[in-house]
Image (cartoon, rainbow, N blue to C red):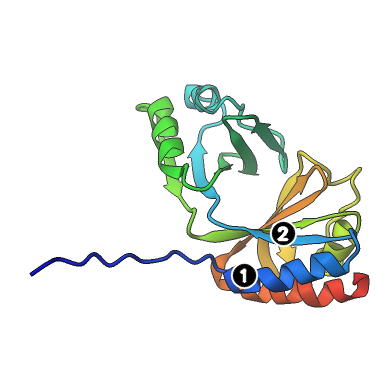
Amino acid sequence: MAETATRTTRHSPLAHAADRFAAATRTSGGDLRLAELPFLAQLDVRLDPKGPAADAVGMALGLPLPLEPDTAVRARDAVRDLAVLWLGPDEWLVVGRPGTQQDLETRIRAAIGDEAAAVTDVSAQRTTLLVAGPRAGDLLAHGCSLDLHPRAFGPGRCAQTTLARAQVVLVGRERGFWVLVRSSFADYVADWLLDAATEYL
């Protein structure tokens, strides 16, 4: 009897919303871009920021761990598209291209060596929404109490905050924002964004 392998297709939490995001983006006339960035690698790293492991992890990633609260660093080139977000005095979120989580975890663990630290793959915990365009800050301001003006929250800034009462990690990007949201709240946040965006469509 021949064996048949069952192949499961992986679906992102918001795959069903792709057409709605695309329609809103088209209708906005360039003012907004909404999209899901599914399956980004995400690793939560906890260690002593003053210990040798912090420098070693920075060297392994090619990016220093940011030490200033609510900041992020990013490297983007032909090989890497990597960001490290400050989440707390001894906690960072490393975000990379889809499918790179195992490589990142291996490199981070090797750099840490015998130092006291924790590395947790949380890639499946959240999905990422891109909110970009000239009206991106205005849209998010409907449900977020942070000052999202580019002078206050531009590239290199991040924060754990709430958006329409949902816990998110908000990251300032060159032309907009990443909204990292738990998969269980992704539908709610997507619906809220699309509803709030009607003002600009």
Under mark 2, the amino acid is: Thr
Helix or strand or loop: what does disc 2 sit on? Answer: strand
Gap between marks 2 and 1 measured at Cα: 15 Å
Asked if one can make out residue 165 in the rendered structure from this viewpoint, the answer is: no
Under mark 1, the amino acid is: Ala
Q: Residue at x 40, y 42 (%)?
A: 102
Judge by depth and name the residue closer to the eye, 58 or 18.
18
In the picture, measured across the screen, residue 132 lies left or right of residue 64, that is: right
Label 1: few (<14), some (14–19) or many (≥20) C-alpha neighbours in 10 Å: many
Q: Which mark is residue 161?
A: 2
Q: Position of residue 138 (x, y in %)?
A: 90, 62
Q: Quadrant of residue 81?
A: top right
Q: Quadrant of residue 80?
A: top right
Q: CB of mark 2 within 8 Å of CB of mark 1?
A: no
Helix or strand or loop: what does disc 1 sit on? Answer: helix
Q: Quadrant of residue 126?
A: bottom right
Q: Position of residue 8 (x, y in %)?
A: 36, 66
Q: Residue at x 88, y 45 (%)?
A: 152
Vertical position of residue 110 compared to residue 134: above or below: above
In the picture, measured across the screen, residue 196 lies left or right of residue 116, that is: right
Name the N-terminal-most of marks 2 and 1: 2
The quarter in which the N terminus is drawn is bottom left
For label 1, the residue is 186
Asked if one can make out residue 75 in the rendered structure from this viewpoint, the answer is: yes
In the picture, measured across the screen, residue 54 lies left or right of residue 134, that is: left
In the picture, measured across the screen, residue 86 lies left or right of residue 158, that is: left
| Residue mark closest to the camera, 2 vs 1 | 1
